[in-house]
Amino acid sequence: MKLIQCRFSSGQRLPLLVQAGDATPLPILIPFIYVQLKLRHRAYNTAAAHLRAIQAFYAYAKSRDLDIDEAILACHFEAMLALLDGYAIWLQSGRHDDNLIARIGKAGTVLFQQISSRTRDQYLRLLKKYLSWCVTRYIPRARQNSATQADINVVFADVADVIERRFESHIINARPDRTRYRSLTDTQLQIVRTLIRPSAVENPFPERLQLRNWLMIELLLETGIRRGELLKLYSTDINR
């Protein structure tokens, strides 16, 4: 299994998890649907981060003889959650087997670098979102012919609660520290706008870039647009 980039004729990029091998790579079914329905309008790097977390869990489950797509379609979520203990250790140990007591001889080649607890928590959070989405999508579909709506709601609530509790017990920093950034003061904002104005004497940018950069700063200030969204715009998109 590998993560590839798919580019449409429109220029849009889409990350895909596909089967590894010599044949034409086919997308992994449920992660493909997840990207199309849940992450379609997210930035490319955001969607790719989700898929990297999903890819790691699929790889670990495969080493334990569990096909995650099959388990999801059969709504065997308990089987997947039973892997969390070993998966969390596997992630932070550089993705070595988590059930080895000792190694004899030279250490084997490290295929993956060890990750920080913060990155590990991020992988677990993204995996939790994926499994929660799968619950909302596939439990009603699997049980709609054999249970009443009330029964479906009870099962859904039970599984959703189990997922929440299992992941809470494995995520180290349940509330990650968030740096508080202060906004620009009115004086600082006035200085920025004075310097960035096209044709301003103290504008530090070449004349050919001054209009573009002024538009970028004003869009950031007026709309709160994200940097990734801003960088997808072209100067030709603006009616001068």
Image (cartoon, rainbow, N blue to C red):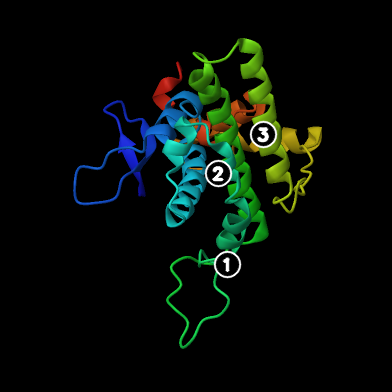
- The circle on residue 65 is none
Relative to the observer, which residue lies in front, 223 or 46?
46
Q: Amino acid at mark 1?
A: Ser
x and y percentages locating residue 139 in the rendered image:
55, 24
The residue carrying mark 1 is 93
Q: Which residue is tagged 2? A: 79
Bin the neighbour count of mark 1 within 10 Å (Cα to Cα): few under 14, some 14-19, many 20 and up: some
Residue at 76% across, 46% down: 174
Q: What kind of element bears circle 1?
A: loop
Q: Nearer the viewer, residue 145 or 57?
A: 145
| Disc on res. 194 | 3
Sequence order check: which comes first, mark 3 or mark 1? 1
Secondary structure of the residue carrying tag 2 is helix
Q: Amino acid at mark 3?
A: Thr
Find residue 239 and report its horizontal and vertical position in percent.
45, 16
Residue at image position (67%, 59%) is 117
Q: Secondary structure at mark 3?
A: helix
